[in-house]
Image (spheres, helix red, strand yellow):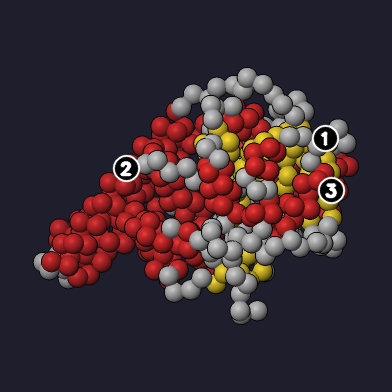
Amino acid sequence: MSLLATALGFLAVLGLVQCFVGWAAVIRFAATPAPAPQQLPPVTILRPLCGDEPFLADALLSCCRQDYPVFQIVFGVQNPADPALAIVRDLVKKLPECDISIIVDSKVQGRNRKVANLINMLPSARHDLLVFSDSDLHVAPNYLMRLVAALERPNTGLVSALYVGRPARRRWPAVLGAAHINYSFLPGALVARALGRQDCLGSSMALHRRTLERSGGLAALAEHIADDNVLGQRVAALGLAVDIADTVPVATVPETSFSASWHHEMRWARTIRALVPVRFGISALQYPFFWALLACIFSRGALPYLVLLGLAWTVRTAAARGIDQALKSKLTQLGYAPAAPAWLMPLRDILSVVEIVVSYSSDQVVWRGTPMAADDGVAPARASLHR
């Protein structure tokens, strides 16, 4: 057995350890008691929209059905012909009691189109507690309650939330995409917090208007692709904590082809790599099947490494199913129960490492049809040269 095979086997063992650590972090998160908020201030939810997508009507409806006394929802689009408008207007007819504002404004302020949309929407927000929420999120009725409770924690300036992925269709590209969110991103985010990081997860962000203004406002985010990371850094620079709420929304994973899934995940990969290049490279260690497979190849199928390969597959699948079980109580109200695809876990590990490696070859990304260059969250993102 070669020295290289031994080293690769060691990396696989490190990956197995991380699987257990991530699994334990999810169990601990799910088991932590959820205190009720002391106060219930009025809230404005801002949901920027861009085009139709699977389950969009259900996602927007879940936003309207909140067990919260006073809240406003602002939906915004930049294109007057955006198909999402018809869905929102139908929602207004069905729920006349819900306080909904619709903003159609084509002004583009900055290269980040999502932030540009939010800039157009913000003047219509009547309340001082703001929640930025992605269009594809399905949220539980206690979503606002949990965000507000987390924001009451001492010295907390910004709250975000974990989320799980739900395949729009039972096709393997979408199932693979959901597996990446559920069994890599989610436990990885919790492990990072346990190690002291305070990352902001941009699918949900809650903060007071004054905090947003003190951090530089939305205009400070408009030239960056990772607007959530920049906002988190700016709030932390004020001496305030960036925390996560004990709610887990469900995000739709719409991809139906490998090409679409690849481009979506490469946008994530290149964005994260631009922010934390060393840490992102090290994150490849969390995929034990990949390293065990390489160890088998370089050992020419030596029995100990074949056993390690089987163990990596088994542990990776067991950890994924354990994460599903731990999060079950958080997802009950949403009527969704993730199911780890055991047969796809090896492919998921291999694909994730390949994406990490390829992300270092370029900083070009495309978000909702807009070419951009991934940036480090300090220097503004550059416009793509390849339009």
x, y percent for residue 143:
64, 34
The residue indicated by pointer 3 is: 102
Residue closer to the observer: 244 or 107: 107
The residue type indicated by label 3 comes to: Ile
Q: State the SS at label 3.
A: strand
At a point 53% along the width and 26% down the height, the residue shown is 154
Q: Residues within 10 Å of mark 1 (few under 14, many from 20)?
A: some
Q: How many marks?
A: 3
Q: Quadrant of residue 195?
A: top left
Q: Earlier in the sequence, mark 2 or mark 1?
A: 2
User: Where the C terminus falls, by quadrant?
Assistant: bottom right
Callouts 3 and 2 close, C-beta under 8 Å: no
Q: Is residue 277 left or right of residue 260?
A: left
Crowd band around label 3 with a 10 angstrom C-alpha radius: few (<14), some (14–19), many (20+): some
> In this orientation, which residue lies closer to the viewer: 326 or 190?
190
- Image x and y of residue 326, in percent: 44, 35
In the image, taking residue 140 as reference, residue 45 lies left or right, namely right
- The residue positioned 53% from the left and 59% from the top of the image is 378
Q: Is disc 2 placed on a helix, strand or loop?
A: helix
In the displayed structure, 348 sits above or below 386; it is above
Q: Amino acid at mark 2?
A: Phe
Q: Which residue is mark 2?
A: 20
- First reached walking from the N terminus: tag 3 or tag 2: 2
Vertical relation: 179 (above or below) 36: below
Label annotation for residue 98: 1
